[in-house]
């Protein structure tokens, strides 16, 4: 099966002028009745059919989660580096670009997409490059435990926006180790994360653990915390959700 999103981009039916989360879901959101293969949204997807099924089954929930966070979220000033962790097919980045528009896209100097599924990563790069109008997104086909500090280190002391869309709650990687790598780069960092609010198989405790860990006084000489906010809410069809917005500056890359 060919990729409907990539085909639409290659034919210019989907382009920088009309791309949006809604268009992505209209083009590729399909019910192939393979919902069970998605592992409740936590499986590593290996086919275009699974990507399309995810868009159909979980796309609106994902958008609703971000729709609650983004109106009150802020971005750092100046040039930016965006890192999308476990990016899947790029839905989190797409929703972010839809909301902030050129206020974000014109300031992006680097984009890194990290995803263990090669088929999802291929679609995500096509989507992000379409939004940005050029093939400029870098990709990393790795699990989050395989990511190294060098993989996510920015150039020129850019402020970094770290995006985690329905990723941080998944217990298939060591979240503390990932954030120790993130905070190995000096400068300003913003974390924007959303997930389903649950108390099993990882879940929301991972948000709370990081929120409290970074505020430990033993890190005060390493991290300057500007704000760290956890929010719980309902979205979509009364689905419980959780978000975390963190703004911090790394003063010494030894967290």
Image (cartoon, grey):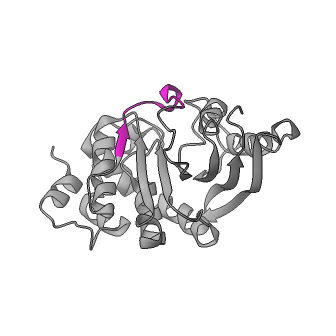
Q: Is residue 112 depicted above or below 78 in this figure? A: above
Q: Is residue 39 depicted above or below 234 in this figure? A: above
Q: Is residue 33 visible?
A: no
**Residue situated furthest front in the rendering:** 156
Q: Nearer the viewer, residue 134 or 63?
A: 134
Q: Nearer the viewer, residue 210 or 248?
A: 248
Name which quarter of the figure residue 237 lies in.
bottom right
State the residue at coordinates (34%, 68%): 20
State the residue at coordinates (64%, 71%): 72
Q: Quadrant of the C terminus?
A: top right
Is 136 contained in the magenta span?
no
State the residue at coordinates (41%, 30%): 142
Q: Quadrant of the N terminus?
A: top left
**Residue situated furthest left in the rendering:** 11
Boundaries of the magenta span: 138-149
Name which quarter of the figure residue 254 lies in.
top right
Q: Residue 59 location, x and y as percent?
A: 42, 58
Q: Residue 78 location, x and y as percent?
A: 54, 64
Is 142 contained in the magenta span?
yes
Q: Residue 166 location, x and y as percent?
A: 53, 48
Q: Is residue 65 visible?
A: yes
Q: 120 left or right of 64?
A: left
Q: Nearer the viewer, residue 150 or 27?
A: 150
**Residue situated furthest right in the rendering:** 217
Q: Residue 140 location, x and y as percent?
A: 38, 36
**Residue situated furthest top in the rendering:** 146
Q: How many marks?
A: 0
Q: 159 left or right of 58?
A: right
Name which quarter of the figure residue 178 lies in.
top right
Q: Is residue 202 depicted above or below 136 in this figure? A: above
Q: 147 left or right of 48?
A: right
């Amino acid at each position: 099966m060919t990729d409907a999103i990539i085909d639409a981009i290659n034919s210019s039916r989907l382009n920088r002028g009309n791309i949006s989360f809604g268009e992505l879901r209209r083009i590729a959101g399909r019910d192939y009745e393979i919902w069970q293969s998605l592992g409740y949204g936590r499986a590593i997807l290996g086919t275009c059919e699974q990507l399309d099924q995810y868009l159909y089954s979980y796309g609106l929930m994902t958008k609703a989660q971000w729709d609650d966070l983004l109106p009150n979220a802020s971005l750092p000033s100046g040039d930016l580096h965006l890192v999308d962790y476990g990016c899947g097919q790029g839905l989190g980045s797409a929703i972010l670009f839809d909301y902030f528009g050129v206020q974000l896209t014109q300031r992006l100097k680097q984009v890194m997409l990290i995803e263990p599924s090669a088929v999802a990563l291929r679609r995500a790069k096509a989507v992000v490059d379409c939004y940005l109008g050029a093939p400029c997104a870098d990709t990393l086909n790795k699990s989050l435990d395989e990511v190294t500090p060098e993989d996510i280190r920015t150039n020129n002391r850019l402020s970094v926006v770290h995006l985690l869309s329905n990723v941080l709650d998944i217990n298939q990687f060591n979240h503390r180790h990932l954030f120790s790598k993130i905070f190995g780069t000096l400068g300003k960092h913003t974390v924007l994360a959303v997930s389903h609010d649950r108390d099993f198989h990882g879940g929301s405790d991972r948000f709370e653990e990081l929120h409290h860990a970074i505020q430990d006084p033993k890190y005060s000489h390493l991290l300057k915390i500007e704000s760290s906010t956890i929010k719980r809410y309902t979205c979509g069809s009364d689905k419980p959700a959780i978000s975390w917005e963190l703004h911090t500056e790394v003063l010494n890359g030894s967290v």
